[in-house]
Image (cartoon, coloured by chain):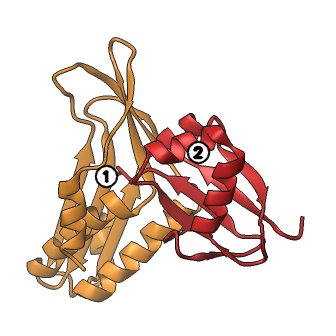
Chain colours: A red, B orange
């Protein structure tokens, strides 16, 4: 529990993932989004397929747009989604 | 509009943009807007604050709808007030350009034949947003 993060998925990505949120365990107390995603994709073929097919996935950490090089810490709220199309 | 002009006696101009659901050649039945609750409010508040500061606005209102909307229904309202027209007009342009690519909303189109399609982001929108960097 102490090293968990919550992940949300939105829009087309939510549909492709087949879930809107999940809790995952961080492999280390401080990892980049890129490292976390690589580990999750290794364990989940469905997720690997979705992320491979969507090169423009965006990430937010604690409800602020971030990059895949930014660091994730325990308790953070992550979100992955396609480019935004509001307005 | 009343709220926009009520802020100050120094307001000399108000600019408004309203976006609405457009019909297409394939017969759109409805448009559903999904968003990221929490982040949406945060981004819109930050955008409004940035516009007020950058264009010396005396009033600013941002409204964005979510859920299922039919053709002709309003989606977004951007209103700005300033001493002179240039700031209000620029502020409105800035807000709609940045909102389209920076606020967490996603459009899903539903057609009369039952098809549902997520709207793809447009490169032109990215360029418009980047032009304010």
- Residue closer to the observer: B115 or B97: B115
Q: Which residue lies most toward the front here?
A: A42
Q: Which residue lies most toward the right here?
A: A1
Q: Is residue B34 something one can see in this rendering?
A: no
Point out the frontmost of discs 1 and 2.
2
Tell whether B30 sits left or right of B122.
right
What residue would you read off at disc 1?
A: A87
Subunit that carries the residue with mark 1: A
Residue A31 higher or lower than B119, as above or below: below
- Res B129 label: none
Q: Residue at x 72, y 78 (%)?
A: A30
Q: Quadrant of the N terminus of chain A?
A: bottom right
Residue B14 higher or lower than A81, as above or below: below
- Residue closer to the observer: A13 or B1: A13
Subunit that carries the residue with mark 2: A
Q: Quadrant of residue B31?
A: top left
What residue would you read off at disc 2?
A: A48
Tell whether B26 sits left or right of B105.
left
Q: Which residue lies most toward the top here?
A: B113
Q: Are marks 1 and 2 on the same chain?
A: yes
Q: Residue at x 34, y 29 (%)?
A: B70
Locate residue B73, reporting x and y percent: 31, 36
Q: Residue at x 61, y 43 (%)?
A: A47
Tell whether B60 sits left or right of B17.
right
Dot 2 surroundings within 10 Å: few (below 14), some, or many (20 or more)?
A: some
Which element is circle 2 on? helix
Residue A77 higher or lower than B30, as above or below: below
Locate residue A15, reporting x and y percent: 55, 35
Locate residue B124, reporting x and y percent: 17, 56
Which element is circle 1 on? loop
- Mark-to-mark CA distance, 1 and 2: 31 Å
């Amino acid at each position: 529990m102490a090293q968990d993060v919550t992940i949300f998925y939105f829009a087309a990505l939510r549909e492709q993932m087949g879930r809107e949120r999940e809790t995952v365990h961080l492999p280390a107390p401080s990892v980049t989004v890129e490292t976390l995603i690589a580990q999750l994709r290794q364990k989940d073929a469905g997720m690997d397929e979705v992320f491979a097919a969507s090169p423009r996935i965006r990430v937010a950490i604690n409800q602020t747009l971030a990059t895949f090089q930014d660091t994730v810490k325990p308790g953070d709220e992550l979100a992955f989604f396609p480019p935004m199309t509001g307005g | 509009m009343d709220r926009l002009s009520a802020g100050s006696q120094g307001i000399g101009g108000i600019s408004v943009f309203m976006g609405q659901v457009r019909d297409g050649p394939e017969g759109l039945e409805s448009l559903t807007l999904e968003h990221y609750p929490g982040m949406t409010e945060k981004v819109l508040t930050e955008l409004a604050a940035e516009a007020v500061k950058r264009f010396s606005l005396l009033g600013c209102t941002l409204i964005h709808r979510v859920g299922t909307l039919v053709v002709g229904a309003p989606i977004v309202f951007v209103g700005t007030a300033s001493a002179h027209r240039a700031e209000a007009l620029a502020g409105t342009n800035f807000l709609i350009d940045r909102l389209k690519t920076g606020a967490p909303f996603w459009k899903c189109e539903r057609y009369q034949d039952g098809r549902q399609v997520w709207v793809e982001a447009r490169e032109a929108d990215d360029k418009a947003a980047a032009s304010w960097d």
